[in-house]
Image (cartoon, rainbow, N blue to C red):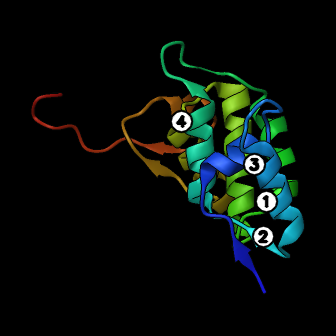
Amino acid sequence: MRTELRTSKRIFSLVNDENWLREPALSALKEHDNVHTSIFAYAEVLVLFYDRATASYDVDVPRAISNLLELVPIAPKAHEDVVLAGAAFIDEYHLPPFDALHAGIVATRGESVLTSERDYDAAGLERLPPEPTPDEE
């Protein structure tokens, strides 16, 4: 039987030795078989890693995400590739959490992105600018 871990706080606790939820989370992982989570929980974890004031991350995101995926995989498996790609975009291009995940989706699916955000250009993704509004002309 598969078990979904629904709380990002428990996943987040696994990267912090001093977090009071760490031991209960590790115990729960040992107690239950086939524990997994969703891409949404990892999106929340990326937000928790992100310091909005400095527009930077408090941890080595690719390493932390790789380690977390070993403990708590994502279902469906294809979403793991999205999160790993997002972590790479964070590391290389310093994208904020949701932009990084959008970039991960675009990259893993081989798609282009329809947006006015120029961060995707720097990340080497094909960006299709939307039609300018009368205010932008």
Q: Residue furthest left?
A: 134
Residue under numbered circle 3: 84
Q: Position of residue 69 (x, y in %)?
A: 81, 54
Residue under numbered circle 1: 72
**Residue type for callout 2:** Val
Q: Position of residue 118 (x, y in %)?
A: 46, 29
Residue under numbered circle 4: 120
Label disc, if present, on residue 35 of the rendered structure: 2
User: Cα distance, mark 1 to mark 2?
Assistant: 6 Å
Q: Quadrant of residue 125?
A: top right
Q: Residue furthest top?
A: 54
* Nearer the observer, 76 or 15: 15
Q: Position of residue 22 (x, y in %)?
A: 78, 44
Secondary structure beneath label 4: helix
Residue drawn at 58 percent across, 30 percent down:
95
Residue drawn at 39 percent across, 42 percent down:
115
Choose the circle earlier in sequence order: 3 or 4.
3
Q: Nearer the viewer, mark 1 or mark 4?
A: 1
**Residue type for callout 1:** Val
Choose the circle earlier in sequence order: 1 or 3.
1
Choose the circle earlier in sequence order: 1 or 2.
2
User: Cα distance, mark 2 to mark 3?
Assistant: 19 Å
Q: Are marks 1 and 2 in contact (CB under 8 Å)?
A: yes
Q: Nearer the viewer, mark 2 or mark 3?
A: 2
Q: Are marks 2 and 3 in contact (CB under 8 Å)?
A: no
Q: Nearer the viewer, mark 3 or mark 4?
A: 3
Secondary structure beneath label 1: loop
Secondary structure beneath label 2: strand
Q: Are marks 4 and 2 in contact (CB under 8 Å)?
A: no
Q: Are marks 1 and 4 in contact (CB under 8 Å)?
A: no
Residue drawn at 84 percent across, 46 percent down:
66
